[in-house]
Image: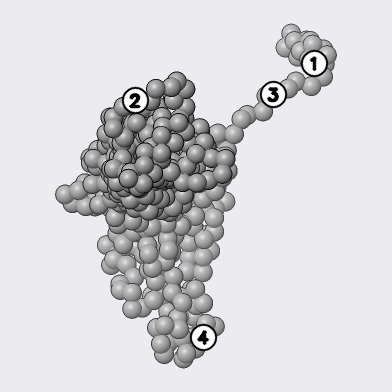
Amino acid sequence: MSVRFLFIVIGLFLLVTSNEVMAQFGVPPATGGTDDKVELFGADSLVVLNVPGESVRKLYNNVRLRHKGVLMYCNLAIQNVTTNVIEAYGNVRLVQGDTINIRGDTMFYYGNSRQANMRGHVIMRDRKMTLTTRQLDYDMLSGIAHYPTPGRIVDKDNVLTSREGYYDTRSKLFIFRQNVVLVNPKGTLTADSLLYNSLTRIATFQGPTRIKNKDGVLTAIAGQYNTITGISNFERRATVETPRYRLTGDTLYYDNPSELGIARGNVIMVAKDRKVIITGDHVRYNGKVGISRVTGHAVAKSMANEATKDTLYLRADTLFSFDNKVTNTRKLVGQKNVFVYKSDLQSKCDSLIYDAADSTIYFYKKPIVWSQNKYQMEADSMRILLRNNKIHTMFLKTKSFVVSLDTLKNFNQVKGRTITAYFATKLVNPDTLLPDTQSGKEGQQAILTATTRQNIPSAATNRTPKDVSVKKSQTASPDTIRLQEKTTLERVLVDGNGQSIYYALSETNKLIGLNHVECSRMNIEFNDSKVGKIRFYGHPDSQLIPPKEFTGETQELDGFRWRESEKPTKAQVLWQETPPDEQPKAKKTVKNKGAIKPLAQKLVQKVNK
């Protein structure tokens, strides 16, 4: 009877101190003001703790609590009614509506601030994703959940891990910090910090970021990446790299499924397999069809000879690059204000095509080509065939004009309807200035002797001079001899309305006279920039003019201009200098305007007289 009486007294005491004890039987509280207090509406047992000045109770098994529409479940709970704080242990679960469900080993819930701190094996779920971590702080007033320990988020297509993160349950926006890794079927993203919207599935990042997929790697500092479409927008110097290409720009748009890339600002595109670098202000690249368009300070750099590090530089207002995926070759097309620079070749024209398949360069619209500082070639259109990345054959069509500068700085000139020029490349020892005898034949055999045999070099000219000595150490090992390639004009074929002016020189390079020839066709051979042997066809009209009778008219064919000042430099092709014809012309100023009228009056008076 005493034990039974004791429990009755305890029950009455609990009823007086807190009518929430009735909630364990499903009876709602009788007094008002409970909206701000955590409600107890179920537990297997309850024990009141004796804490001075506070109302504290311990709840056991199947504990169910409720606060402002949030339901809480656990195996054991300590409820401080006075401070409105809950300590929950064992199979803790927090349910907010039909959207948020959080599980953990331990929870501290602060009812006044509506803050839930979950510890242990924490799992947070909503309709879009599942978050797993060891620690989660959930502010229900702001709807923001924060995990200060490493976490893992999984949604329909993505798995994301980070050292720390924030999740806005209302906007579905994540903020991740440190060691961020986002993995989905389209690729893997790693970053220092990342914003991710689980509704739009768009990742926004600030800081070094790397995206890798089966097609390549993209690195950037700031931008956005759509994990659904695979479209990226990047800023602050971004780079996309594939096994064949590398594209870099201040800003970069890249559509991974369509392989479409648009780069702006200091753009650099590298074709790794073809040793080509293209730079410009704006590049549009379509990887599927293999077409690139470059505008704004566009330059293409092609490694012409890897052994000598000789590079061909091509500049134009607009550059196009076409890749043939069947033959694995490329075409470069330059439009408007085209400039070319190579160690043995410089050119300017309106448009150009460089076909790597057959090593051919096509020039259009009044092209002009310079070679080896000795040759100048012009025509309405031209075609250059390269062999081993050196000029081998040049075809000039319509209004063709070739100028060769000899050792005495005289201009040998050839013009005609079409001209074919053949070049020879020899290995030369710069220490002796002699051709390498092991490089092959020094030239083709002579066809016919010229009209003046004095200008034909004798066999003695190819012998080693007596004053030139070659050390045994130079000839003993090829590795000790420093050889250089030298390209020279070897032969010129003229077809149609042929005209030529060439200077006859003796074996000692003494000027003999000037040959002026006109015929329908001609074949001219050169030897070290000097005319060697020549053949004329179709009733040639030839005249030898002695040096004393030289005049400006006899020394120049119609249309002759030595345009060396227009020859582009490497700096001009690289947009580091402005070509002379593009520099702004100074306005003409008339000095002493008052003197013009009296001068004109005097001129009129003289005419009248």
Q: Quadrant of residue 100?
A: top left
Quadrant housing the N terminus: top left
Q: Amino acid at mark 1?
A: Lys
Looking at the rendered structure, the kind of residue marked 3 is: Lys
Q: Which residue is mark 1?
A: 593
For residue 588, which numbered disc appears in the image?
A: 3
Q: CA distance from mark 3 to mark 4?
A: 59 Å
**Closer to us: 436 or 341:** 341
Q: Earlier in the sequence, mark 1 or mark 4?
A: 4
Could you tell me which residue is drawn at 21 percent across and 52 percent down? 328
Residue under circle 2?
Answer: 28
Distance between mark 2 and mark 1 Cα atoms: 109 Å
- Residue 359 vertical position relative to residue 157 in the rendered view, above or below: below
Q: Position of residue 512 (x, y in %)?
A: 50, 59
Task: Report the front residue among 505 and 496.
Answer: 496
Q: Alpha-carbon distance for marks 2 and 3? A: 101 Å
Q: Quadrant of residue 535 in the image? A: bottom left
- Sequence-wise, the earlier of marks 4 and 2 is 2
Q: Of the numbered discs in the image, which one, if any, rests on residue 326?
A: none
The tag on residue 469 is 4
Q: CA distance from mark 1 to mark 3?
A: 13 Å
Instruction: Please state which of residues 308 and 596 is positioned toward the viewer in this rendering.
Output: 308
Q: Secondary structure at mark 1?
A: helix
Q: Residue at x 18, y 51 (%)?
A: 327
Residue 386 position, x and y percent, is 31, 55
